[in-house]
Amino acid sequence: MRTQNTNKGENVTVEPIRDVVAIESIKKMVASKPRDLLLFTMGINNALRTGDLLKLKVSQVRRLKAGDSIQIIESKTGKTNVLVINKATYKALQGYLSTLKPADNDHRLRLS
């Protein structure tokens, strides 16, 4: 895996974060940003790309509970994938939703 700047057209291999210590460290870094914590937690627990998660609307996730799931169509592959709401994701989701106004249902998870 190459971690330094690359030249235009050069292929870069990206590996998932598997080290639990590194994951917890990242969660601590984004803990003060509920949206970022939610996106990281959803992505790391479901092996989904952030770009696909950013397409979600608040109305799609507002009423989800731990154990629920929703389908996401991956933009890169066009395949359907499942986003499972586990306890960690649910906790992060509730933290993010508590920062929103009730009228924010149609907003995407990204900042405007």
Image (cartoon, rainbow, N blue to C red):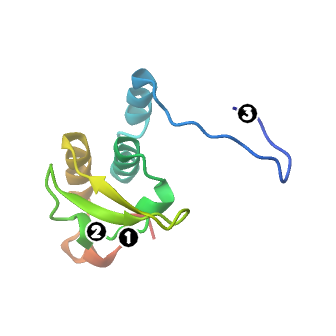
Q: Which residue is mark 3?
A: 2
Query: What residue type is disc 3 on?
Result: Arg
- Camera-side mark, 3 or 2: 3
Name of the residue lying farthest toward the front: 79
Dot 1, how many residues are within 10 Å of its Cα: few (below 14), some (14-19), or many (20+)? some
Q: Position of residue 64 (x, y in %)?
A: 17, 60
Between residue 83 and residue 34, name the one nearer to us.
83
Q: Earlier in the sequence, mark 1 or mark 2?
A: 2
Task: Please state if 59 lies on the left or on the right of 28 as rendered.
Answer: left
Q: Is residue 92 above or below residue 112?
A: above
Pick the quarter of the image with the C terminus. bottom left
Separation of disc 3 and disc 2 at Cα?
36 Å
Displayed quadrant of residue 58: bottom left
Assess whether mark 2 and mark 3 are in contact (beta carbons under 8 angstroms): no
Name of the residue lying farthest toward the top: 21
Q: Which residue is mark 1?
A: 108
Query: What residue type is disc 2 on?
Result: Val
Which element carries disc 1, helix, strand or loop?
loop
Q: Earlier in the sequence, mark 3 or mark 2?
A: 3
Task: Please state if 26 lies on the left or on the right of 7 as rendered.
Answer: left
Query: What residue type is disc 1 on?
Result: Arg
Q: Is residue 44 above or below residue 104?
A: above
Q: Residue at x 31, y 64 (%)?
A: 71
Q: Is residue 30 above or below residue 103?
A: above
Separation of disc 1 and disc 2 at Cα?
6 Å
Which element carries disc 3, helix, strand or loop?
loop
Q: Earlier in the sequence, mark 3 or mark 1?
A: 3
Q: Residue at x 19, y 72 (%)?
A: 102
Q: Which residue is mark 2?
A: 58
Assess whether mark 2 and mark 1 are in contact (beta carbons under 8 angstroms): yes
Q: Position of residue 24 (x, y in %)?
A: 38, 28
